[in-house]
Image: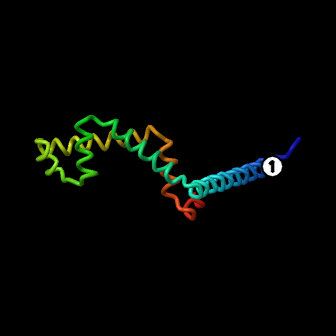
Amino acid sequence: EYSLNGWLLQVTKNFILDGLKKTANDRKLQDKLLERMNAFREHGMNSVIEKELERIRQGALDSLTPQQKIIFTLSREEELSYEQIAERLGLSKNTVRNQMTAALRTIREYLSDHPDIAFILLLLLSGENNFKTL
């Protein structure tokens, strides 16, 4: 009973309206997240975020083997070269490099298994202007 053109027009109209609703909902979500981020700033939530990041950092370090943890700490916190670490620990430079590679892989896996980390990093790394464009 309905013409094909009329049906296509209605389907197209519904598709466009659904797209506009999604866009509006996304904007509402962006505005809500921006509002919460501003509330964090206003209410001194930076210390809460810093504590959460420290918890995440510690969890990532705890996922390493004892040797990887020592090598990672010497490399990243004490800023020693692989050669200096090898000398200090009595290991070959290749062992240090291999252990560091494994440590970085383990940390990446830890971070990818914790999606809440991405949200926290998004809050920290997003400025107000950048956040609205997400």
Q: Residue furthest bottom?
A: 129
Crowding at dot 1, Cα within 10 Å, few <14 / some 14-19 / many 20+, comes out as: few
- Vertical comparison of 34 with 112: above or below: below
**Residue at image point 24% right, 54% down:** 79
Report x, y in % for residue 4. Answer: 81, 46
**Residue at image point 57% right, 65% down:** 129
Report x, y in % for residue 132. Answer: 60, 60
Quarter of the figure that contains the N terminus: top right
Left or right of 17 on screen, residue 134: left
Left or right of 24 on screen, residue 5: right
| Type of amino acid under label 1 | Gln
Report x, y in % for residue 89. Answer: 14, 42
Q: Exactly how many numbered labels are in the figure? A: 1
Q: Which residue is mark 1?
A: 10
Q: Quadrant of residue 57?
A: top left
Identify the secondary structure beneath mark 1.
helix
Quarter of the figure that contains the C terminus: bottom right
Q: Nearer the viewer, residue 35 or 95?
A: 35
Q: Nearer the viewer, residue 69 or 100?
A: 69
Q: How is the image coloured?
A: rainbow
**Residue at image point 61% right, 55% down:** 39
Q: Residue furthest right?
A: 1
